[in-house]
Image: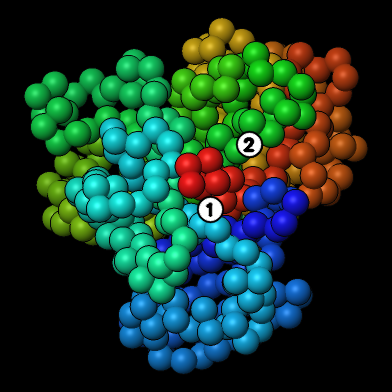
Amino acid sequence: MTQRTVLVINSGSSSIKYQLVDPDQGTSLAVGLVERIGDTGRIEHTYNGEETELDVPIPDHGVGLRYVLDLFEEKGPNLAEANIVAVGHRIVQGGKYFDGPAVIDTAVHQKIRDLSPLAPLHNPAHLKGIEVAMELLSDVPHVAVFDTAFFQHLPAEAATYALEKSVAEKYEIRRYGAHGTSHQFVSQTVSAKLGRDDLKQIVLHLGNGASASAVVNGEAVETSMGLTPLEGLVMGGRTGDIDPAVVFHLVRQAGMTIDEIDNLFNKQSGMKGLTGRTDMREIAKLIQEGNPDARAAMDVYVHRLLKYVGSYTAIMGGLDALTFTAGIGENDAKIRTYLCDRLAFMGVKLDEEKNQTRSKEPRIISTEDSAVTVLVVPTNEELSIARQAMTVI
Ligand code: AMP
């Protein structure tokens, strides 16, 4: 078969991440990043192991993407020769409208814009990327792939906040979830690996952002992120679950503004707030050095994971597969051990040798007689976006 490729774009307010993916082979041909848009500007482009770095002023997304296309031309791979057939755009918030990928036309564009109040930092930034990419790569279809889509059909009892109904309806307040592309990709990989679709699964996406999902027979039935990615697990800089009355308290007692509290909860809290560090490698080092704050923070992190695994197991009425993914989930064997040790009462048994083995392949790390199969599956959101884009073009 002739090669086909999809350019996957994740456009942020001051950055554009991109990857050229072969959806059939599951490989990445080139990867890059435009950052500090609107400021000093910087681009990194890697192809064939060769990294090119450019420090140039990048006033807006259009200029940034033009540089990227020039780099494809100069450094490779040539997009025409690579047979680019689509551009896939990662979109954080698809609200109630999207339960799968959608070819971007005027109506889809407008819906992404309409959803901006639910994702004020993300959707407007995605639109900037979409607009310049559609102008510069006008020969191929552009597809929106939504981070919320996998959770669109959560059962009502999981999606609904016990908030006064008319307020919730008017402002479209429900649990939308996030990281859906990763949870979908990983849960499908687990089904393929175990050769079974009829599974009760928990996926723990533990990266700088972190979320859990419960998946029954391929359908998501619960997830830890809510209206926004703030809810749920302890993260690099986010609190995760916290009593909303803390907001009232901080407004009344500390005189803080809503923006200050937003920043506090989303950027200055979580592991960073507890230890001063976001990177688990540094936190592990602090623990080794006997730092009590780091030890206590890890206890909070694992305790929260345990709460979610326990409640999701109860919701599903059992658990067949527990899977770790993303930066921490894939690399941090200690956290896997801490959690699985606490799950021994459910018959979870890790094979420590397998747990310590590093690999880029999906793998089972539990013992043969473990009551739950425990796996590590490297997530690949770009490949998932590329494959989803192919399904609608
Ligand atoms: P992600 O958001 O999925 O890219 O994950 C980023 C996070 O993964 C970093 O902040 C680190 O805390 C964590 N991480 C990456 N490599 C390791 C490692 N070898 N051990 C522990 N944590 C790691």
Local crowd size for mark 2, using a 10 Å CA cut-off: few (<14), some (14–19), many (≥20):
many
Label 1 near ligand 1 (CB < 8 Å): yes
- Image quadrant of residue 345? top right
Q: How far across and down, in percent of the image, does residue 307 sit?
A: 52, 25
Q: Secondary structure at mark 1?
A: loop
Which amino acid, by three-letter code, is at mark 2?
Val
> In the shown orientation, is residue 202 left or right of residue 123?
right
Local crowd size for mark 1, using a 10 Å CA cut-off: few (<14), some (14–19), many (≥20):
some
Disc marking residue 355: none
At 42% from the left and 56% from the top, the residue drawn is 142
At 24% from the left and 47% from the top, the residue drawn is 107
Q: Is residue 191 visible?
A: yes
Q: Is residue 296 visible?
A: no
> In the shown orientation, is residue 310 left or right of residue 362?
left
Would you name the residue on which mark 2 appears? 186
Q: How far across and down, in percent of the image, does residue 309 sit?
A: 57, 24
- Figure quarter occupied by ligand 1: bottom right
Q: Secondary structure at mark 2?
A: helix
At 66% from the left and 79% from the top, the residue drawn is 76
What is the distance, in whole Å, between disc 2 and disc 1 at their CAs?
17 Å
At 64% from the left and 45% from the top, the residue drawn is 379
Q: How far across and down, in percent of the image, does residue 211 sit?
A: 50, 38
Would you name the residue on which mark 1 appears? 208
Which amino acid, by three-letter code, is at mark 1?
Asn
> If you read the primary sequence from the N terminus, does the residue marked by circle 2 or circle 1 appear first?
2
- Image quadrant of residue 225? top left
Q: Nearer the viewer, mark 2 or mark 1?
A: 2
